[in-house]
């Protein structure tokens, strides 16, 4: 067995993580001006180089705005953000998302899965359908909720691949941490067979090349998780 090297976060990473938490939690408000870099360095007991590089990274992620001769301000990250901002939000609180964030992720899933159906069903091959079934069966055979969640994500990622859209698998992969957490929670609350059945039913529409049926099922199954009896909110 090979063991991975254990490494500590750098001071810059700790600086960035602390400010992300302060901003995402609302303790630092949008538009609020930060103290000068020298003051931050003294209060946080780090070098000015750490503060400067951390601020630059937070600016790149859309959390801060640096204005020449005016100072550094908390940005409206929902307007200024990038994919890095999205990943920071997803990893906030160790992946334990707010209800509004869970709902937003599921709504995006509806859009992505619907697009995948529209793109793949007209041209999907029998071998691709068989590959998707293998991914589905891995959910049923999973030993625990964690393994089942991983298998469910593998099915969704394979589904995005067969759509033929080159960006969709990358978008799906960027959503992996929170989606994995949500499906793991689904399994804990409702059982692996329920997760398997949900994905298997979608697969049957794909197998039958029933585009309209698949789209309707995606909407109804996600509505059930957002509003119905299989909700997966933490709060």
Image (cartoon, rainbow, N blue to C red):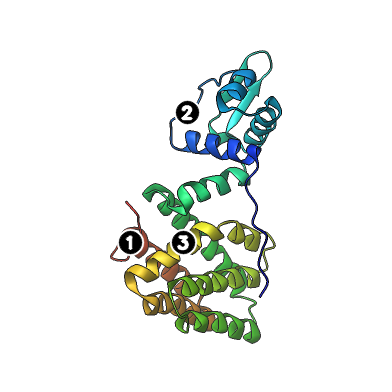
Calculate the distance from the C-alpha at mark 3 to the C-alpha at mark 1.
14 Å
Other residues around mark 3 within 10 Å, as few (<14) / some (14–19) / many (≥20) = some
Q: Along the polypeptide, which appears first: circle 2 or circle 3?
A: 2
Residue 208 showing in the rendered view: no
Residue 128: name its quadrant: bottom right
Other residues around mark 1 within 10 Å, as few (<14) / some (14–19) / many (≥20) = some
Circle 2 is placed at which residue position? 28
Nearest to the eye among marks 3 and 1: give it. 3
Q: Along the polypeptide, which appears first: circle 2 or circle 1?
A: 2
Q: Along the polypeptide, which appears first: circle 3 or circle 1?
A: 3
Q: Residue 152 bears which disc, if any?
A: none
Q: Nearer the viewer, residue 189 or 40?
A: 40
**Residues at badges 3 and 1 in contact (C-beta under 8 Å)?**
no
Circle 1 is placed at which residue position? 231
Calculate the distance from the C-alpha at mark 2 to the C-alpha at mark 3.
27 Å
Q: Residue 181 bears which disc, if any?
A: 3
Q: In the rendered view, does 225 fall on the left or right side of 116?
A: left
- The percent position of residue 100, horizontal first and vertical second, equals 39, 47
């Amino acid at each position: 067995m090979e063991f991975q090297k254990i490494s500590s976060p750098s001071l810059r990473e700790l600086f960035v993580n602390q400010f992300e938490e302060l901003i995402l939690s609302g303790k630092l408000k949008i538009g609020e001006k930060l103290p000068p870099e020298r003051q931050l360095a003294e209060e946080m007991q780090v070098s000015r180089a750490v503060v400067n590089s951390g601020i630059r990274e937070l600016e790149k992620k859309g959390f801060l705005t640096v204005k020449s001769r005016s100072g550094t301000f908390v940005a409206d990250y929902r307007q200024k953000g990038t994919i890095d901002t999205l990943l920071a939000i997803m990893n906030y609180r160790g992946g334990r998302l707010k209800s509004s964030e869970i709902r937003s992720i599921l709504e995006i899933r509806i859009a992505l899965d619907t697009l995948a159906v529209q793109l793949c069903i007209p041209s999907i091959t029998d071998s691709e359908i068989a590959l998707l079934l293998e991914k589905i069966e891995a959910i049923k055979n999973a030993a625990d909720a964690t393994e089942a969640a991983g298998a469910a994500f593998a099915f969704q990622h394979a589904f995005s691949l067969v759509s033929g859209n080159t960006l969709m698998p990358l978008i799906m992969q960027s959503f992996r941490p929170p989606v994995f957490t949500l499906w793991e929670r689904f399994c804990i609350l409702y059982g692996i067979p329920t997760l398997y059945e949900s994905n298997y039913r979608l697969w049957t529409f794909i197998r039958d090349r029933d585009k309209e049926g698949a789209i309707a099922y995606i909407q109804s199954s996600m509505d059930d998780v957002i509003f119905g009896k299989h909700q997966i909110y933490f709060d």
